[in-house]
Image (tube, rainbow, N blue to C red):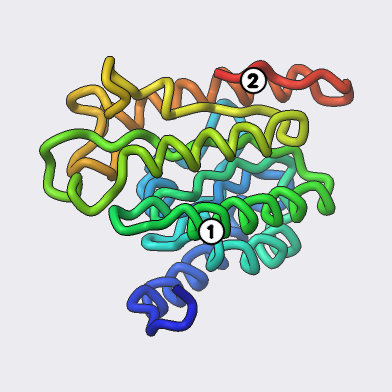
Amino acid sequence: MTSQPNPFAPHWLIRDIVIGSHRAAVGQGGLLFVGDSLVEGFYWNRIGSVPVLNAGYSGIWTEALEPRVPLLLKSAEPSLAVLLVGTNDAKKDCTEASLDAAAGHFDRILTHFDDAGVPLVVLTPPPVEKAKRLTGFYSVEAMASLSRRMVAMADGRAAGIVDLQKGFAGGDGTAKAGMTADGIHLSAQGYRQMRNMLETTIAAVSAGRGHDDRVEKS
């Protein structure tokens, strides 16, 4: 993907400017929420009592996000972080090799948080909802496969895991009706449920800080 022109580059430049401005308002010790458009669309500025620095980049995939993470960690100096990426790695035409590569970049992203000593909550990409505008551009199976790999890699390394694949899924593995606006991007209902799951997990992480206990998967 990096060998092709990046149509999102101008937007990401604008996001860098916005994130820099917002960083001053949040200050040190906030919650760094980093990822793709599902993060960029997260419209709360606090989770519990912790201010949120929204570092979402619409259209970003794991390979493109990976080098940005250490820069964000250095500039934001968060006390806690949340990561949601992978949706744009699970397009309809993706291959097993491309999923392997995405998993490798995800592993390096985890290492950046390890190296910075910042507790991390990992969210998996949510399932695809049927029969909506963007449904046909994404692979239900690839999204589920990548999410399983992310859970396995984050287990024992992340302070908490919120598995949106399970939390949002209906009986056939696709998203329950109404969880997305267009098949991929979350609806208001979907965002409220994600926020509730995050609040529960982050409260448990905060309560366990200073201990070796890990938060159970949601």
Which corner quadrant holds the N terminus? bottom left
The correct choice, above or below, for 13 with respect to 196 in the image is below
Q: Amino acid at mark 2?
A: Ala
Dot 2 falls on a residue whose secondary structure is helix
Residue on which the image places disc 2: 203
Image: 40 above or below 183 = below
Return the mark for residue 141. Answer: none
Asked if the residues shown at circle 1 and circle 2 are in contact, with their CB atoms under 8 angstroms apart, the answer is no
What residue is at 72 percent from the left and 63 percent from the top?
A: 70
Q: Is residue 6 left or right of residue 155?
A: left
- Residue 99 pos. (x, y %): 50, 53
Q: Position of residue 129 (x, y in %)?
A: 22, 34
| Residue bearing mark 1 | 62
Residue at position x 71%, y 24% in the image: 205
Q: Position of residue 42 (x, y in %)?
A: 40, 43
Q: Residues within 10 Å of mark 1 (few under 14, many from 20)?
A: many
Identified by mark 1, the residue type is: Thr
Left or right placement of residue 107 versus residue 135 in this view: right
Specify whether 190 is left or right of 83. Answer: left
Of 176 and 17, the residue lying toward us: 176
Question: In the rendered view, does 20 fall on the left or right side of 132?
Answer: right
**CA separation, marks 1 and 2?**
27 Å
